[in-house]
Amino acid sequence: MMAVSAVAAASGAPNPRSPARDSQAGVSGAAIVTIAGSGTAEKDASGVVIWLVPLEAMQPVRVAAQRPHYRLVQRNKKFEPALLVVPVGVVVDFPNADPWFHNVFSLYRGKRFDLGLYQAGAQRSVRFDRIGPSFLFCNIHPEMTGVVLAVDSELFAITDKTGHYSIAGVAPGKYILRVWYENATPESLQALQRQVTIESANKTVPPISVRATKRAPVEHKNKYGQDYDPATVKTDY
């Protein structure tokens, strides 16, 4: 069964101390999402982010100017993908692929920014230099929501609907495994951290049980802290 993998390799000059590619391993596993208080597993376990931080370094990943940009497209009044995971310090481009204006902003947690109003075919960019989730909205279309999660690693993956994930190219060594899920509390995610030792062979990590809270949709405000104008919400643009 294929897993959704989102691993980014570092660019720039090779590290002479890094082990040979054939000595690197793949790390795979699965996450089980349960609603707190119910004990039943969710049928859709996608959207759980798993990443590995080298124990010896325990520092944010190196910011390199040569790194390629990531892309988060605005299309059909949606963010594609709705969840984008990136190493901290990289630039994310926000191209507008819709035939109308958008105004992407994030003011609540993580990286705070306001890209302003820009037209079809235009693009704005943001450097995500703060670890953690940045929740995205559009000041024109309240139905548009998304998340950019900046992590302190270049070894990460997102689970598919079955909860499976796979991270390739992991050098042998000791790592801290970290977990993020939008509907889980920071305290429960902190408790899921664990140390893992990776050898040259592929490794399967024991299942991770994520306790989520059942949250009702939140009616967010626009970038001015005001309710969206009902007249503009009903328009076709």
Image (spheres, grey):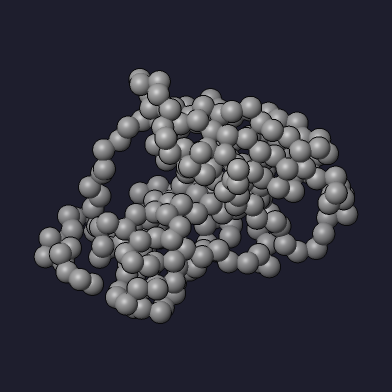
Q: Quadrant of residue 96?
A: bottom left
The residue under the point 19% across, 55% down is: 226
Q: Residue at x 64, y 43 (%)?
A: 166
Would residue 95 be found to the left or right of residue 31 on screen?
left
Please give left or right for residue 187 compared with residue 172 in the image: left
Q: Residue furthest front?
A: 1
Q: Position of residue 57 (x, y in %)?
A: 73, 41
Quarter of the image where one finds residue 101: bottom left
> Is 170 drawn above or below residue 232 in the view shown?
above
Rendering coords of residue 6 (x, y %):
60, 52
Residue 53 appears at what percent x and percent y?
67, 40
Classify 217 as above or below 236.
above
Q: Is residue 125 visible?
A: yes
Q: Residue at x 69, y 33 (%)?
A: 204
Which is more toward the observer, 150 or 25?
Answer: 25
Quadrant of the frame with the N terminus: top right
